[in-house]
Image (spheres, rainbow, N blue to C red):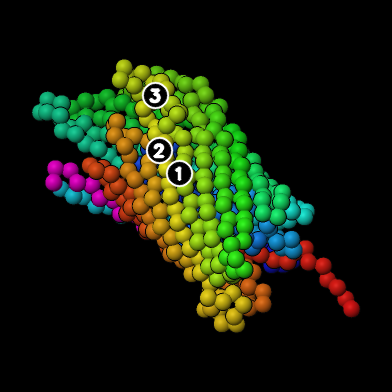
Amino acid sequence: MSKRIFCGVLALGLIVSAYGQTSLSSPYSQHGIGCLADQSQGFSRGMNGAGIGLRQGNIVNTLNPASYACVDSLTMIFDMGVSGSLTNYKETVGGVTKSLNTKNASFDYVVGAFRLRRNIGMAFGLLPYSNIGYKYIAATYLDKTNGVMTETHEGSGGLHEVFLGAGWQVLDELSVGMNFGYIWGSMDKSVTSSSTTYINSLARTYSVTVNSYKLDFGVQWQTSLSKLDALTVGATVGIGHKLGANPVHSLINVSNSVTTSDTISNGLSLPMTYGLGVAWRHGMNLVVDADFVMQNWGSLDFPGIGTDGKYAMQSNILKNRYQVNVGADFVPDPLARKLLKRVHYKLGGGFSTPYYNIGGKEGPKDISVSAGFGIPLQNSYNNRSMLNVSAQWVRTAATGMITENTFRINLGLTFNERWFAKWKIN
């Protein structure tokens, strides 16, 4: 019981402290609703976030709620994760290349799962959805009369999700699941312009608060290929809908405090999201998973300043997003006495397209690779709890735009204890 109390206090402390820290620093987060977050857990982060087809009883896999159906009936699982990153930015203007480095750290997620009854598993937790964090200054020389015009761009905020999910094993080979989430957060962006020859300065601000629901469905079908090999096919659908949020755009004359504002009713939406994953398992030693995800952002309008200078819904800001992730997990001998033979070795890679346009051009694409370890925290007969450590490199780039190279370290701690085991005295 003391260990459980300690784990609960530790998780609460991490959550409270981490939400006061900056978790992102990217100029690309000014577009759309920010940079979309990785919602995978520690086990699959070393596999570059692949997991729609993963089906294991000792992990919480929120990427496909159908996986909850196979949660071990004797255990209560808690999983929490943190990460730290170093990002290098490069931009070439007029043949001159400039470079900048930033550091960030964040609390990423906390989730749990347990068996509700036979063939039914439950899960719950807190996940990130999107992040906004940037500040930069752009200067433009106009002429001798008007001098230099500077614009300060700044933004913060993001969206978070708390969810409750369930998975049901309908047949021996088929399970279905659902996540019902509450999504909330605020987004604040501003552009302040001033000139060396004018006293007045203008500021544009964009702000919105979100409080809505999120609904995701999943299915997994598993079949044996041989005595050692099994194949799992998973599919997910995220329901798109309006968020009921009212974005506000304000134009402020800083010198004389003159303000005009425009509000768009129900101006933000979540897209329909479709995912497909295939996982192959060989005995207790190897798992390989490949995922494909499509988010239908292109069908959504988004608030913006049109060619007429008015703040209104625009149809050319967002575009469909496609993502592919492939990962593998290998353990030499999960029943061995030597620790190194029980360690899980992970490797993965992925590619994704942007969900927004910048100035009428497609935004930057992401290329990523990852590697990691899953280290059992107990002896060879009860190696249920796990420390997952992984490293990931992500390159975000597009022709004529800023190039980001991010190196990220992920730490995930999975507590897997036999809360529901019955003791028998002979």
Instruction: Name the residue that disc number 2 marks.
Output: 355
Mark nearer the N terminus (2 vs 1): 1
Instruction: Name the residue that disc number 3 marks.
Output: 314
Residue 95 or 198: which is nearer the viewer?
Answer: 95
Look at 52% across and 44% down and name the residue there.
275
| Image-based side of 91 in relation to 2, left or right | left
Residue 362 magenta-highlighted:
no
User: Mark 2, mark 1: which one is toward the viewer?
Assistant: 2
Look at 59% across and 69% down and name the residue there.
228
Which amino acid type is marked by label 1?
Answer: Leu
Instruction: Name the residue that disc number 1 marks.
Output: 36
Tell me, yes or no, if residue 347 can be seen here.
Answer: yes
Which amino acid type is marked by label 3?
Answer: Gln
Look at 60% across and 66% down and name the residue there.
226
Q: How far across and down, in percent of the image, does residue 202 sit? A: 31, 26
Residue 19 or 159: which is nearer the viewer?
Answer: 159
| Image-based side of 159 in relation to 426, left or right | left
Label 3's element? strand
Look at 12% across and 28% down and name the residue there.
143
Secondary structure mostly seen in the magenta stretch = strand
Q: Quadrant of residue 405?
A: bottom left
Q: Quadrant of the C terminus?
A: bottom right
Measure the C-alpha gap from mark 3 to mark 1.
20 Å
Answer few, some or many: residues within 10 Å of disc 2's Cα (few below 14, many 20 plus, some between 14 and 19). many
- Check whether the beta carbons of the residues at disc 2 and disc 1 lie within 8 A of each other: yes
Measure the C-alpha gap from mark 2 to mark 3.
14 Å
